[in-house]
Amino acid sequence: MKKLHQKFLNEEKGLKICYTLFTTLKPFFVVSPTVTKRETCLCRIHDNFDLMATRLKYLGFTWEKVNDKVEVDVGAIEKMKENTFWWNWRICSKTFEKNGLAKTSKAFQKVRVTGTIHELIESFVELSVIYYQHVYRKRVQERAYIDCKQMVLKSDYDGLLICDFSQNYGCKLANEIQGYHFGSARQQVSLHTSVLYTGILKEPLSFCTVAECLDHDPSAIWAHLSPVLDHIRKICPSMVTLHFFSDGPSTQYKQKKNFYLYTNNLNTYGFFGSSWTYFEAGHGKGAADGIGGAVKRKADNMVAHSRDIPTAREFFKALNEGESSTLFFFIEKEMFEEFNKSLPEKLVAVKGTQSIHQLVPKSDTEVYHRKLACFCSKNKWVKREFCDCFPMVSTTLLKKNASEEILVNKLPACSTPKAAPCKKKSTSEVILVNKLPSCATSQASRKQPLKKGTYILVGLGKFTYAAVTQEDVEGDVEVLVTFFKKCIKSKYFCYDESDTKFIKCSEILKVIPVPSLVAKGNRVYYNFGDLKVLEK
Ligand SMILES: [Zn+2]
Ligand SMILES: [Zn+2]
């Protein structure tokens, strides 16, 4: 406040106002920062990027941040060799002793990194690549959520359920003796919250399931979801399709056990179409978290008004009695065991689980999945027919040998072949589709706007690359594209989804013909004919 007062006096030269009056005239919305209101759910990639960018700015490197796009002016070469430092969130291992044994644990730490300015810029550029992809995925997933929500709110047959585990609630008594307050007698309550959106109901419906068992693993997820799905079935008898949304921690929602329980149990609740969409890592906070916070505040408020909440069951009772639009269910321990028992011992890990962002049940033991989610109107969820905005593959969860990926529509962007029957030839090569229908037909002239899914030749310096546009280009300066990589010792190209970035429109050299698809073993290659590229 003193600093603000000084600043005010410096800026408003003619005004003389004493400190006491200044504090009384302070508008109500100017508040002192508190430890509870600080940011605690920042995304690591975003924060690391911000930390480095702030440091670069401090060091005099001008940069501009416009809609998550950053441009760094890499001038002042003589400055590059100077030493500096910057902050970075990193996973560090710590060693500690427990019962005489040395143990290590891994935890995030904010580390002070030292190096030259040149090294800082190099790390920044390196991170930028990851950052761009991260921002792209974040946007696509958020778009998918918005699209899905709009779709279900207009429909009498579809629903959207967004769910999340809340941080455990520590039980409290209205008055506590010192031994209880500081001791380890305090019980914890596990809370799983979800919000249902559907056109069948006028308002979104929120659920909070309460359990004594503190597990957050896949069997716990289904123990918590089970009464919620039963209830939805009861109040929305017309609902055929239910889309799930959650964040994607590898110990909870995004792992083979949850995939299995999901594909296995969904039909028993009478949902024939479904999908499970994961938000981009670090950006999974949604409506369900709000419910958790509100429920805990309510419980605290009851304790403040002399109600004892010593156990999970009491917590459930207290909140269930109170007036609330949220529906509460108590989950018995047996439920956890029941789902745990239903898990087969040998489940196959799905390749690249961490990069999956949308999952659809295929059968009891098979799933379809893709790296980015889409809810465009081409998806027929009940029929299990999907758009080809992003490639969809299928994987068997239960298998003797190894997990097997079968191509469903592994094509970038707009191409639209319906899995043409691949006739086996004597060689191991199978031509899937001779010629893909193109969205880019008759776009010979570059002056015309380019559609999403146009195959292009990109010139970066003296090198050239094949790529496909991921968005419509119409008077934009930049366009998001995914690059193809030429395979070694082969005339074919691979689609490299991880190599998705913005390029300047001026870097597009020409529109190239739509490639044909070639399957070899489990992989799919793109044949651009006699296209010449000069890759770095
Ligand atoms: Zn982020
Ligand atoms: Zn789509």
Image (cartoon, rainbow, N blue to C red):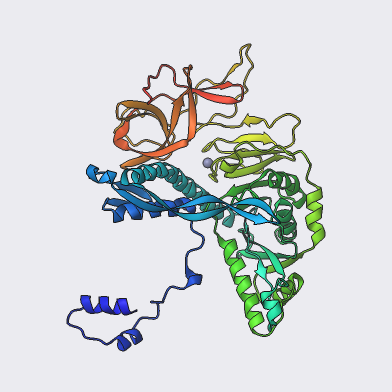
Query: Who is closer to the viewer here, 490 or 428?
Result: 490
Rendering coords of residue 411 (x, y %): 52, 31
| Residue 237 in sight | no
Q: Quadrant of residue 388?
A: top right
Query: Total number of numbered labels?
Result: 0
Rendering coords of residue 155 (x, y %): 60, 54
Residue extending furthest left?
14
- The quadrant the C terminus occupies is top left
Residue extending furthest front?
100
- Image-based side of 2 in relation to 425, left or right: left
- The quadrant the N terminus occupies is bottom left
Rendering coords of residue 23 (x, y %): 34, 84
Q: Quadrant of residue 173?
A: bottom right
Residue extending furthest top?
426
Q: Is residue 171 above or below residue 358?
A: below
Rendering coords of residue 316 (x, y %): 73, 71
Residue at point 34%, 45% (across, down): 121
Residue at point 80%, 57% (across, down): 335
Q: Quadrant of residue 397?
A: top right
| Residue 435 in sight | yes
Residue at point 77%, 49% (across, down): 268
Query: Who is closer to the viewer here, 223 or 14?
Result: 14
